[in-house]
Amino acid sequence: MAKVRLEGITRQFGGVAPRATVAAGITDITFEVPDGQFWVLIGPSGCGKSTILRTIAGLETATSGDLYIGDCLVNQIPARQRDVAMVFQNYALYPHMSVAENLAFGLQMRRVDAKTTQERIETVAEMLAIDHLLDRKPGQLSGGQQQRVALGRAIARQPQVFLLDEPLSNLDAQLRDETRAELKRLHQQVGITTIYVTHDQVEAMTLADQIVVLDQGRIQQIADPQTIYGSPANRLIATFLGSPPMNILAATYDGTAFQIGGQTLPCPESVQAKLQPLQGQHYDLGIRSEHLQISADVDHLKVEISVVEPLGREVLVRAVLPTSSSRSPEVAFQCRPDQCPRVGDRLSLTLDLKQLFIFDQQTGNTLHPS
């Protein structure tokens, strides 16, 4: 096991600086994953998650910066000597080998004895529910089964560092949940330093000790899952994590309150004291769905129901603010099944103003809460 440290790692594509298209790669990536921790890289497609992972693995060469595994600078060390195990999105299995032979391959290359190899194969195969497939070739497996074999091959090696690039993306929902739980259990037992790339916010929130949020090749925020969710550094992070995403409403300050699509929302005193807004200033207001409620008493927003999505124990409701504009502001909120409105209903919502976020409309940075 070992810590992983990146210091100013940049990977450029498309030519030689300064004309290289830096945005296509990663820029000034700096963080340290302590020994034994589980870190998750998350962000929109094309943000550089997989490039970081491939650079750590040695499959990409950094344009600049230093990369350490343990206390060893590995910039010039080839991938095969870094003692990391990587699981790719595209499986990368040997088609001429059986499942058992694929699982054993990394161990045999490291001259692990036959008894230990067999024990690890059996343990991993049972954990990933592929023990009945050990004699089959990859071509005889479904995509999800191939992904589990690729995951098992990495787990069986017990390397210094796990690098996982969306390893659960091809599994069905139930198996994804089960395998995610097994991954967390495995990490708690073995404690191997793990860096995990995903676009799935549930995986990020449930697995990570720390989350690294990326956009356009740059780090936006590094924090534990609850901090990322409750104190996002900017609007992109606020809307990326959370299901449904945080509601964002463009608003104008009128001197005492916010105007949203012709409706008035009180401006909390804490916001006025901190931001000291001027009349006519524009902001983006953020509120999560769980902080909106149907109300007959306090009229913060009047909405018209557009979509109702029953989810069993709760109902997700999407609504629009009736305005003369062709693009009416939209909000999503949750309610109990016995409160479920119908499409076309008009009703009032109250917001928990203590949970209100204020974003700079131009930069997207969080202005409140700090």
Image (spheres, rainbow, N blue to C red):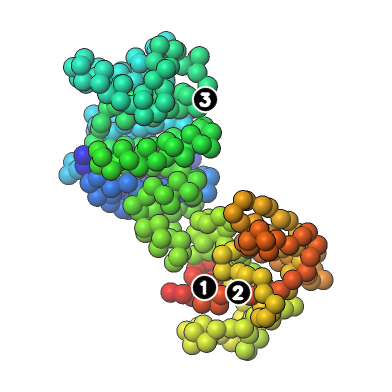
Q: Tag 2's secondary structure?
A: strand
Task: Residue 337 in the image: state x and y as whole percent.
Answer: 66, 58
Q: Decide if residue 112 is in sight here.
A: yes
Q: Nearer the viewer, mark 3 or mark 2?
A: 2
Residue of label 3: 143
Give the residue at x 35% y 42%.
Answer: 184
Pointer 3: residues within 10 angstroms few (<14), some, or many (20+)? some
Compared to residue 210, the image places residue 193 above or below, namely: above
Q: Are circles 3 and 2 on residues that touch, CB within 8 Å?
A: no
- Alpha carbon of mark 1 to alpha carbon of mark 2: how far? 8 Å
- Alpha carbon of mark 3 to alpha carbon of mark 1: how far? 42 Å
Work out whether residue 286 or residue 220 is closer to the camera in this orientation and state it. 286
Query: Which residue ends up furthest to the front in the rendered image?
Result: 338
Q: Are circles 1 and 2 on residues that touch, CB within 8 Å?
A: yes
Q: Quadrant of the N terminus?
A: top left
Task: Residue 180 in the image: state x and y as whole percent.
Answer: 42, 40
Three-letter amino acid code at the position of disc 2: Leu
Q: Tag 1's secondary structure?
A: helix
Three-letter amino acid code at the position of disc 3: Gly
Residue of label 1: 355
Using the image, tell me which numbered label, if any, was put on residue 351. 2
Task: Residue 333 in the image: state x and y as whole percent.
Answer: 63, 63
Residue 347 falls in which quadrant of the image? bottom right
Pointer 1: residues within 10 angstroms few (<14), some, or many (20+)? some
Compared to residue 283, the image places residue 187 above or below, namely: above
Pointer 2: residues within 10 angstroms few (<14), some, or many (20+)? many
